[in-house]
Amino acid sequence: MASVWSVGPSVLETAKWVRVKQILIISDGKPGHRNQSMGLAEAIARRTSVEISEREPMGRFEALRLFLGGALPQLDDCPDLLIGAGHDTHLTLLALRKLYRVPAIVLMKPSIPMGFFDLCLVPEHDQPPKRPNIIVTHGALNRMQPGKKAPGSGVILIGGPSKHYNWDETGMLVQVRALLEHAPRNWLIGSSRRTPASTEQALSGLCGDRFVPASATGPDWLPQQLARAEVCWVTEDSASMVYEALTAGCQVGVLPLSSEADNRIGKGVEQLTAQGLVVRAPDWSMNGLDAESIVLNEAERCAEEVLRREWL
């Protein structure tokens, strides 16, 4: 088991005889998956005293052997809860669930039957069935937290080619130009690792020093900008950023792209639009937002459900 790196509230630390509960994250190393798992674990840690640690998945055959009845090895201190996201974590979650006899939570629609897991947190665009061990979420969980908003601030986040969308550089630049013209703000424009070099060059020419390429940012740049921004516009391919911006308390707009057929990511954005949680260009004034809509914070909601089940 990896070393502990995050600790929740210290209320119980004065009682030395009380064992602090342990959350073990199975991490496949992908930033998006880790972001989901840490979002839930940190939300739990804000409510009760826990220690959070991480480990890599077992080898597929080792995990399968253990799950199907192999000898149980003597391992480190027993965790109280297992969390994982990504298909490569599934067998390890189930193997360790059997070994430690503790609940296992998967943060996605798994590739094996959902009944094997104690809890599945599944985005609504995946259309999960209604079962006691399934919680339907607005998109993937994340670690975002709202901050104090800077008046007149805004962020525009540009993605790039993906398997779900056709990247139209010219059309995207037309939308950004119209946004800057019709919705004047103190804008910052950021790119992603998927943004083509030609798009970044064009954005630099259009936006000047307001454009910040992904290569010039660190891991804290996006959380800091979203926490302070009143408004955020995101290209439609960057679905995770849409949900992060909503969780950060931004008013969110989507810059549309043409999509492939049967695009579940696009269906999720359509649901958010129908619910008044986001608007689509060219609604630059964001009149389509529902002023009465709830603040989106799925990690907090799911953490409450985990604690309600008294697993920690």
Image (tube, helix red, strand yellow):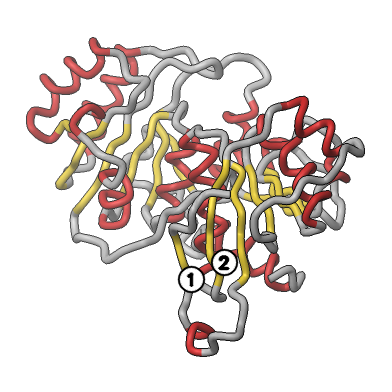
Quarter of the image where one finds residue 109: top right
User: In the image, is 301 to the left or to the right of 116?
Assistant: left
Q: Nearer the viewer, residue 131 or 262?
A: 131
Q: Considering the image in quadrants, where does the C terminus appear? A: bottom right
Q: Are marks 1 and 2 in contact (CB under 8 Å)?
A: yes
Quarter of the image where one finds residue 205: top left
Q: Residues within 10 Å of mark 1 (few under 14, many from 20)?
A: some
Q: Label 2 belongs to which residue?
A: 44
User: In the image, is 147 to the left or to the right of 98?
Assistant: left
- Give residue 145's position: percent from left, percent from top: 40, 60
Mark 2 residue element: helix
Q: Is residue 87 visible?
A: no
- Give residue 225's position: percent from left, percent from top: 26, 49
Q: Residue at x 61, y 54 (%)?
A: 24
Q: Residues within 10 Å of mark 2 (few under 14, many from 20)?
A: many
Q: Label 1 belongs to which residue?
A: 8
